[in-house]
Amino acid sequence: MKRTSSLLIAVLAVFALPVMAQTATPNLDQRQANQQKRIDQGVASGQLTNKEAARLEKGQDRVQKMEDKAKADGKVTPKERARLQKAENIQSRHIAREKHDRQRDLNHDGKKDRPTRK
């Protein structure tokens, strides 16, 4: 009995590994984590206003939904992977643009700081 169950487990593991390998997207997951850190750092430093951060978070959620949809059938195809990479590239540009657009909230009061005139 023990031998049969261990054999069954081994056979199931052999068939499950390729499926798990095809649905795993570790690079994309790491990139999303890095971009989330960039957003959090921008809020903490005042480079991003609350409104900008909310808009960027919405974009991150959109990419996550795309990833979930790609994984739904059990396999992430090269075409889906390329589409996800493109969405991450666009999101990365949005984060960079918003962080460097000179709209600041350095005192963290929820309002944009006005530039000082000389």
Image (cartoon, rainbow, N blue to C red):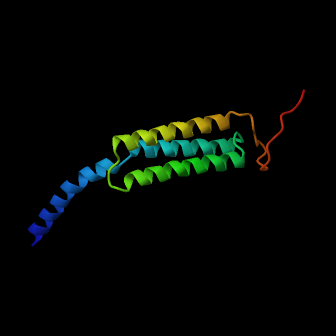
Residue at screen point 35% across, 40% down: 78
The N terminus sits in image quarter: bottom left
Number of disc labels:
0
Residue that sits furthest to the front in the current view: 79
Judge left or right: residue 30 versus residue 106.
left
Q: Quadrant of the C terminus?
A: top right
> Residue 91, image x and y in percent?
56, 40
In the image, taking residue 55 as reference, residue 113 lies left or right, namely right
The reply, left or right, for residue 38 in relation to residue 77 is right
Q: Residue at left 56%, top 46%?
A: 36
**x and y percentages locating residue 62 in the rendered image:** 53, 50
Residue plotted at (61% across, 44% down): 39
* Residue occupying the far top of the picture: 118
Q: 36 above or below 4? A: above
Give the vertical position of 12 relative to 63 (above or below).
below
| In the foreground, 76 or 17 | 76
Where is residue 61? Give x, y as percent.
Answer: 54, 52
Tell me the residue at 37%/41% (across/down). Answer: 79
Picture quadrant where residue 47 is located: top right
